[in-house]
């Protein structure tokens, strides 16, 4: 009997973690929404961090999309972390140095290690962690920062 009770408690706990809690959050979001106070004019300094390994195929387009943001360029810092790249990734970033793009070279250790290396070098009040393959819409950064005007918000994510 004790084994059955213990099994049932563990099964219920697993169900709650895997399905119950997400269903509870969905229910709360649908029936008890908390409005977000966006302020389109809200501005903070932002450091965009791109951790990349052998991303020469996408990197120029990504950097161009960041530099075309409808956001004050003086408030935007861009750091590209080369995670042991063996292609032209680092050369491409160096070509953007005059436009303020910074290169950080680290030995290959994976994306989490590359991000951890970049964060201490970031000067922005907010961090934008973005992958090299996705091109950002020109209003992306302004829309994300506008949500951060709400003091109840701690993190924002875009839709892919």
Image (cartoon, rainbow, N blue to C red):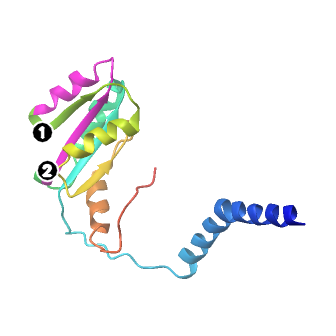
Which residue is at the front of the view, 2 or 18? Answer: 2
Mark 1 surroundings: few (<14), some (14-19) or many (≥20) residues within 10 A? some
Disc 1 designates what residue? 100
**Residue 34 occupies which quadrant of the picture?**
bottom left
Q: Nearest the camera: 41 or 79?
A: 79
Left or right, residue 17 beside residue 100: right
Disc 1, disc 2: CB below 8 Å?
Answer: yes
User: Where residue 118 sits in the image (x, y, percent)?
Assistant: 26, 40
Residue at the spot x=85%, y=61% of the render?
A: 3
**Mark 1 or mark 2: which comes first in sequence?**
2
Kindly identify the residue that appears in the image at 61 percent across and 65 percent down: 22
Q: Is residue 93 magenta?
A: yes
Residue count near mark 2 (Cα–Cα under 10 Å), binned few <14, some 14–19, many ≥20: some
Q: Which mark is residue 80?
A: none
Q: Is residue 67 visible?
A: no
Q: Which residues are magenta?
A: 75-97
As drawn, the label of residue 73 is 2
Q: Quadrant of the N terminus?
A: bottom right
**Residue 36 included in the magenta stretch of the image:** no
């Amino acid at each position: 009997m004790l084994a059955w009770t213990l099994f049932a408690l563990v099964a219920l706990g697993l169900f709650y973690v895997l399905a119950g809690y997400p269903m509870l959050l969905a229910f709360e979001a649908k029936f008890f929404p908390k409005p977000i106070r966006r302020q389109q004019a809200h501005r903070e300094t932002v450091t965009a961090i791109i951790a990349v390994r052998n991303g020469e195929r996408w990197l120029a387009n990504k950097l161009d999309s960041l530099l075309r943001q409808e956001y004050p360029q003086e408030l935007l810092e861009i750091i590209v972390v080369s995670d042991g790249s063996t292609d032209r990734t680092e050369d491409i970033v160096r070509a953007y140095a005059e436009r303020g793009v910074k290169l950080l070279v680290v030995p290959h250790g994976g994306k989490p290690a590359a991000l951890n290396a970049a964060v201490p070098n970031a000067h922005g009040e907010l961090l934008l962690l973005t992958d090299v393959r996705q091109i950002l819409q020109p209003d992306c950064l302004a829309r994300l920062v506008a949500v951060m005007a709400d003091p109840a918000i701690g993190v924002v994510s875009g839709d892919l």
